[in-house]
């Protein structure tokens, strides 16, 4: 996998499907390594509404309200943001919150996953094709 980029074709949109008719909210993710990485470690990143890519494990450490604030409520919103980011330098944060332990991250990850799954009827992941 290559470096994280703002190319819509490299993104996956996860339909969490607890919105009306099973449409949305949506989470945008991508696998790759952070620009400037010296380890080239493959990781999953989540696109935030401000256009920054945040390490998935750091995302689950955010308070629930902040996580939900980063969800997209329509595919149009996803595509508009990705269109705005096309050709722009990538902003990615591949760091974990200071002082967090592996056990703490795992606990938050499990809580986040259970909360999302409780609200989902189905979940599908599709690559975006421009």
Image (cartoon, rainbow, N blue to C red):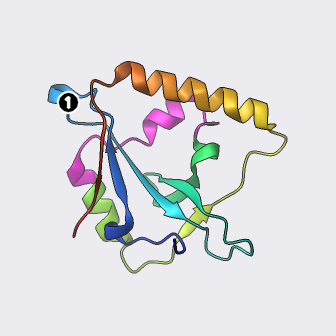
Residue at the farthest top position: 118
* Quadrant of res 129: bottom left
Residue at the farthest left position: 21
Tell me residue 114's x, y (percent): 50, 22
Q: Is residue 28 highlighted in magenta?
A: no
Instruction: Rate crowding at label 1 as few (under 14), some (14 to 19) or many (20 or more) other CA atoms within 10 Å.
Output: some
Kindly identify the residue that appears in the image at 71 percent across and 55 percent down.
95
Kindly identify the residue that appears in the image at 33 percent across and 34 percent down.
16
Tell me residue 80's x, y (percent): 26, 61
Above or below, comparing residue 45 to residue 16 in the picture: below
**Which residues fall within the magenta stretch?**
60-77
* Quadrant of res 15: top left
Tell me residue 13's x, y (percent): 33, 51
Tell me residue 52's x, y (percent): 52, 60
Residue at the farthest bottom position: 87
79 sits to left or right of 10:
left
* Quadrant of res 38: bottom right
Report the front residue among 62 and 120: 120
Kindly identify the residue that appears in the image at 35 percent across and 21 percent down.
119
Kindly identify the residue that appears in the image at 20 percent across and 30 percent down.
22
Residue at the farthest right position: 99
**Residue identifier under label 1:** 22
51 sits to left or right of 37:
left
Q: Is residue 76 highlighted in magenta?
A: yes
Q: Secondary structure at mark 1?
A: helix
Q: How many marks?
A: 1
Report the front residue among 29 and 69: 29
Above or below, comparing residue 122 to residue 87 in the picture: above
Quarter of the image with the C terminus is bottom left
41 sits to left or right of 10:
right
């Amino acid at each position: 996998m290559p470096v994280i980029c703002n190319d819509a074709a490299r993104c996956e949109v996860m339909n969490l499907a607890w919105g009306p008719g099973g449409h949305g909210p949506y989470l945008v993710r991508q696998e790759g390594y952070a620009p400037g990485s010296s380890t080239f470690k493959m990781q999953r990143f989540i696109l935030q509404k401000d256009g920054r890519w945040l390490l998935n494990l750091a995302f689950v450490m955010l308070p629930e309200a902040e996580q939900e604030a980063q969800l997209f409520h329509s595919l149009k919103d996803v595509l508009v943001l990705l269109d705005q980011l096309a050709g722009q330098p990538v902003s990615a944060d591949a760091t974990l919150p200071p002082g967090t332990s592996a056990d703490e991250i795992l606990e938050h990850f499990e809580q986040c996953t259970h909360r999302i799954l409780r609200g989902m009827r189905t979940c599908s992941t599709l690559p975006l094709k421009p």
